Image (cartoon, helix red, strand yellow):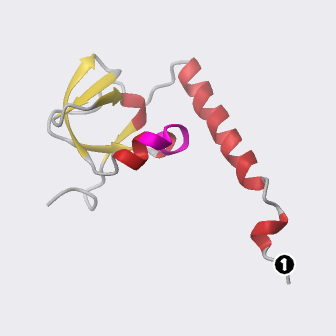
């Protein structure tokens, strides 16, 4: 009996290519979801888009980060630990994900 995952090994690559195309379309057309939506002290985490597009950031920084301020109003965020990124790549944590 064949393993189902080995029958169509290219499906995963096609799916990721499609997701990357959707994300690139959002970036190219300025469809940012997080313009000015975060408040100082909130806990943020990388979103699914970041997991698709910037693997190194996800591997290095899995921990939630606390929002400090906007560097460029609505676009780039800075965290209390000194890291920063575009607001496009982060999301607000759900209440069950927050630090105690």
Image coordinates of residue 90 in percent, x first then y, are 37, 38
Q: Range of the magenta residues?
A: 50-56
Q: Quadrant of residue 80?
A: top left
What's the residue at 66%, 45% (across, down)?
16
Whether residue 53 is in magenta: the answer is: yes
| Quadrant location of the N terminus in the rendered image | bottom right
Residue nearest the viewer, comparing 95 with 63: 63
Figure quadrant of residue 69: top left
Task: Return the residue at label 1.
Answer: 2
**Residue 34 x %, y %:** 37, 30
Horizontal side of residue 44 vs 8, given as left or right: left
Left or right placement of residue 54 versus residue 75 in this view: right
Residue 42 position in % (x across, y down): 19, 41
Total marks placed: 1
Q: Is residue 80 above or below residue 3?
A: above
Which quadrant is home to the C terminus? Answer: bottom left
Report crowding for label 1: few under 14, some 14 to 19, many 20 or more residues within 10 A (C-alpha). few
Q: Which residue is most to the top? A: 72
Q: Secondary structure at mark 1?
A: loop
Residue at image location 70% in from the left, 40% down from the top: 18
The verdict on residue 79 being magenta is no
Image coordinates of residue 86 in percent, x first then y, are 37, 26
Q: Main secondary structure of the magenta part?
A: helix
């Amino acid at each position: 009996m064949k393993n189902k995952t080995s029958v169509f090994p290219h499906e995963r690559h096609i799916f990721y290519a499609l997701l990357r195309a959707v994300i690139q379309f959002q970036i190219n057309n300025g469809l940012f979801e997080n313009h000015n939506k975060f408040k100082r002290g909130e806990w943020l985490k990388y979103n699914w888009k970041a997991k698709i597009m910037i693997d190194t950031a996800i591997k290095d920084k899995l921990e939630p980060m606390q929002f400090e301020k906007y560097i460029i109003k609505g676009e780039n965020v800075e965290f209390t630990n000194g890291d920063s990124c575009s607001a496009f790549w982060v999301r607000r944590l759900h209440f069950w994900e927050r630090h105690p």
